[in-house]
Amino acid sequence: MTIKEKSPVLEHQSLELLNQAVAIMEESFSEANLPSFDSSLDDEETKRLQSVLTEVAIRLKDNFPYPHPLYAGQMIKPPHAVARLAYTLALWFNPNNHALDGGRASSVMEKEAVANLASMLGFNTHLGHLTSGGTMANLEALWVADRLHPGKIIVASSQAHYTHSRISEVLKIPFKSVPVDANARMDVQELEAMLKSNDIGTVVVTTGTTATGSVDPVIQIIELQRKYKFRIHIDAAYGGYFKLAENLSEHARLVFDALHQADSIVIDPHKHGLQPYGCGCVLFKDPSVGQLYKHDSPYTYFSSNDLHLGEISLECSRAGASAVALWATQKFLPMEKNSLFAKNISTCHKSAIDFYQKLMHDERFVVPFEPELDIVVFAIKDKSASASSLKAKEIFAKAAESGLHLALANLPAELFKNKMPDINWDQDTITCLRSCLMKPEHQEWLPEIWGILTNSVLRNS
């Protein structure tokens, strides 16, 4: 089917499979020999339900077209059908994975799914669990880091996600930012200069920054760790699944092959892992950090002698449905090398490289560096940084009018000065256009994306 042919954007044929699966779950109540209990809706409730759902659907029409390939703005990737269905199935039980008392089957599925992620990232031993997202996962990693190096500073690059400085403030941990190099990666020389003070306990390494998709130099940071004895926490919330990609640059390949040397890693299945939002994961290489979580709960840990997930987690109630959805997705799409899942990740990177090549050969655009994952940032040539920034915003709006949704990013002028030496740098930042080509379908739609972008530039001339 060509991209010009009309077809449903929102997949819904798979909903027919739900009734069959619900019927199988219903058997558990018959097997338990429970008294009859009628939970069906009466006619009046059904009519009201239909009315409310119709209103919800109408309200949700006020959205950007996130599932469509012409949406290439923020890091929003539609969950796979298997994740949507498995998540929905679990909601009939609404399990709570804090304790086995509230999420027996889903807790086991979580442990299996998390072990799968740990294996993918290269951990031979691990302690970990799912979280409500990357922020909570990073909070746990930094909390553990502070317990092991109390009072010592946590550092991350100036392009790392703002969550690290915010979390450090919440946890009352001193935090410092490390400048970046011309590729928006943590500057290793600047880092070592800071390490010489011997007051840094943890270095946060980002493998896929939010704004530019840059991959910090893990190999060099590991070498510094041997000299200065700090913890390495890797924020792979966005980029973790690129461990499976087969077409990365030499730098990125070396980085992802070295992830297993970190002390802790965060990855977000609700990004490239095809999950609904509310699914992050934190992993520790040394399982003994579990003793730091030790606490008493007088009413939730009595149904099993096995380890409850709440005993190795700062969160209490957590959606067991997230674990069920991830487990099902990993069964349907094995997350291993040479799999369909891995090939789709590679395709996302190829889309970014192809888009980068088009931009590089068009004198109207300036690209600071080659994309390392699937995020491409580019500026518009003009006489000054402020004029370029204004034009980027105008093109952003015109592209959206034509159905192409990009994002805007304010980046440091230093990332562009070598590429744009002749313009007037009348401000310290420049507003760029940013594309996040995280759907495999973006590869097929690149001609359409390019056509709308270049036409939007012409309309803005």
Image (spheres, rainbow, N blue to C red):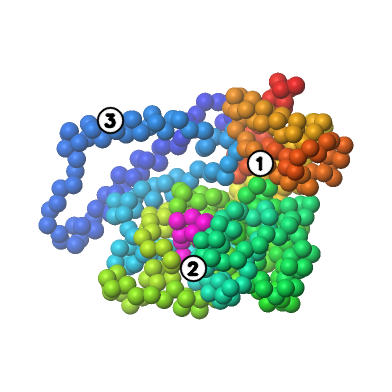
Callout 3 amino acid: Ser
Residue holding disc 3 = 51
Residue underneath mark 1: 409
Q: Secondary structure at mark 2?
A: strand
Q: Residue at x 19, y 43 (%)?
A: 40
Relative to 259, say whether 452 is above or below.
above
Residue type at mark 1 is: Ala
Q: Is residue 349 left or right of residue 360?
A: left
* Label 2 packing within 10 angstroms: few (<14), some (14-19), many (20+): many
Q: Which of the two discs, 2 and 3, labels the residue nearer the N terminus?
A: 3
Q: Which residues are magenta?
A: 129-137
Q: Position of residue 8 (x, y in %)?
A: 47, 31
In which image quadrant can residue 151 be found? bottom right
Image marks 2 and 3: residues in contact by CB distance under 8 Å: no
Badge 1 or badge 3: first in the primary sequence: 3
> What residue sits 32% from the left and 58% below the top?
95
On the picture, is 233 further left or further right than 323? right
Marks counted in the figure total 3
Q: Which mark is residue 128?
A: 2
Q: Residues within 10 Å of mark 1 (few under 14, many from 20)?
A: many
Query: Which x, y percent locates residue 340?
Result: 58, 51
CA distance for labels 1 and 3: 40 Å
Secondary structure of the residue carrying tag 1 is strand
Label 2 to label 1: alpha-carbon separation: 33 Å
Residue positioned 66% across, 62% down in the render: 176
> Which one is nearer the viewer's eye here, 39 or 200?
200
